[in-house]
Image (cartoon, rainbow, N blue to C red):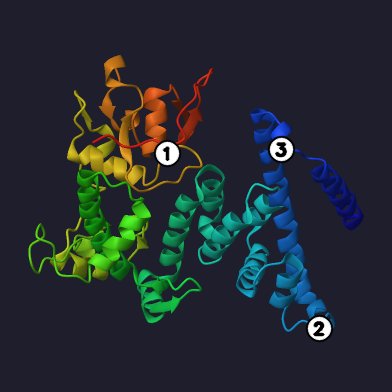
Amino acid sequence: MLLSTLREVTDRLRSGLADLDPERLSGADAARLLEAFAEVERLAAAGRLLSARRVESSNVWRRSGHRSAAAHVARASGTGIGPAITALETARNLGSLPATDEAVRQGRLSEAQATEVAAAAIVQPEAEAALVETATHQPLSMLRLRCRRVRAAGRGRRTSYDAVHRSRYLRDWVDADGAVRLDARLAPDAGARLLAAVHTEAARLARQARRSGSDEPARAIAADALVGLTADPPSDRPPGAAPGAVVHVRVDRDALVRGHVAPGEVCEIPGVGPIPVEVARRLSVDSLLSVLVTRGVEVTAVAHAGRTIPAALRRALVERDPVCVVPGCGARERLEIDHVEPVAEGGSTSLSNLVRLCHWHHYLKTHHRHRLEPDGPGWRWEPPADPPTVPGRIRRSG
C-alpha cells in the first residue's frame, strides 16, 4: 500500500538527514543530493495535491473539525490559508488537464509550475501541452509570462484587463521596526508607467552615486527613486517633465490597425504582460510605442558584417530573449547582448549567433570560458572542464 511505503521512505529519510553533515560532502555530491531532494520534493508535492483534492471532495475535513478543506490542508502542510486555497484550486484543475496531471505525477513539474500551468490551461486547454513543455525547459519567470498571455487570450484581453483594473488597490502599513510598507495591485499600463518612472529616476540616482563613489544596492536606489518622484524635479531634469513617462509596448502592426489581436499576434508590455489593443492606442498618445512588425521584414534573416547590431535585429533579439538565456536564470533586468561565437573567431552578427545574458553569465562566458551550446529550441550552459575560481561579487566597470 502506498501509505506504508511512504511511511517507510519517510523513516529512512529522517534517519538519513539526522546523520547528514553537509560540510563533509564534496561540492559535486552536494549538487547531486540537491537535485535528488528537489525531485523528491516535486513528487511529494504531487501526492499532496492529489490527496488534498480527495480531502476536499470526501468532506473528511468536516469530520476533523476544520472550518473548510483549505483549513485542513493548511494545518496538515503547515502553510497559510491563502496557499492552501491555491493548492486546492490547482488540484481541482489537474482533474481536467491530463498532460499537466501526468507531468505532475512524474515529478517533472514543481508545485509552483503546476499552479501556473493549470490556471492558464484550464482557461485555454489547447495551450496545455505547449505550457507543460515551457515549464520543463524555461525558467519560472518565462512560464509565468506565457501563462499570462494564455489566460488573457482565453478570457478576452478586455475582460482580463477590466477585472484587474476593478481590483486595483494601494495598501500601506507600518511594521514593527517603524518602517512604512507598501503593497499595490495596478492595471498593466498603470503599473508600467509607475515602474518606468521609478527606473528612469533610479538610473539618474545611480549615475550620481557612481560619480560620488557611493556603493548603494540597486534596491535601495529604487526606493530613493520612488520617494524622489514626489519631490521637486532636480536641476538635471526639466521642470514639469514626467520622469520615465516612456512606456514600451510590443504590438503587431496589423493588430494596432485592426483594433484587436488575432491568433498568433502580440500586444503586451514587455516584462508585464498582455494588454488590450485599445490600451496600447491610448498609451501611444503620450508614450513611446514600440511596434514589432511580424509580417514585414523577415528579422531572422537580418545580419551585419561587423559587431554593430542593426535596430531590426536588436528588436528581434529582445522579442526572442526576454530573459537571460542561461537555463534556470530568468533575470530580465539589464541584460547584455553577446555573440555566441565571438566575432574575432568568425562569428556573425546574426540572430542565430546572438543571445541576451545577465551581467554575471556574460562575465563567466567572456572571462572564464563558460560556453553556450544549442539544445533544441534553447541553449545548454557548459562550464569549463577545469573551472577557475571566480569572485563572489563583480562590479560593472565605468
Furthest-top residue in view?
345
Residue under label 1, please give it: 325
**What amino acid type should be assigned to the residue bearing mark 1?**
Val
Position of 396 relative to 167 (above/below)? above
Q: Of circles 2 and 3, which is in front?
A: 3
Residue under label 3, please give it: 22
Q: Of circles 3 and 1, which is in front?
A: 3
Reading the chain from its start, which is encountered first: label 2 or label 3? Answer: 3
Question: Which of these two is toward me, 395 or 63?
Answer: 395
Q: Quadrant of the N terminus?
A: bottom right
Q: Judge the density around disc 2: few (<14), some (14-19), many (≥20) Cα neighbours within 10 Å.
A: few
**Disc 2/disc 3 C-alpha distance (Å):** 41 Å
Reading the chain from its start, which is encountered first: label 1 or label 2? Answer: 2
Reading the chain from its start, which is encountered first: label 3 or label 1? Answer: 3
Assign a secondary structure to mark 3: helix
Left or right: 75 in relation to 3? left
Q: Judge the density around disc 3: few (<14), some (14-19), many (≥20) Cα neighbours within 10 Å.
A: few
Position of 159 relative to 393 (above/below)? below
Marks 1 and 2 in Cβ contact (< 8 Å): no
Question: Which of these two is toward me, 301 or 19?
Answer: 19
- The answer to which quarter of the image holds residue 249 is bottom left
Left or right: 340 in relation to 36? left
Q: Quadrant of the C terminus?
A: top left
Residue under label 2, please give it: 65
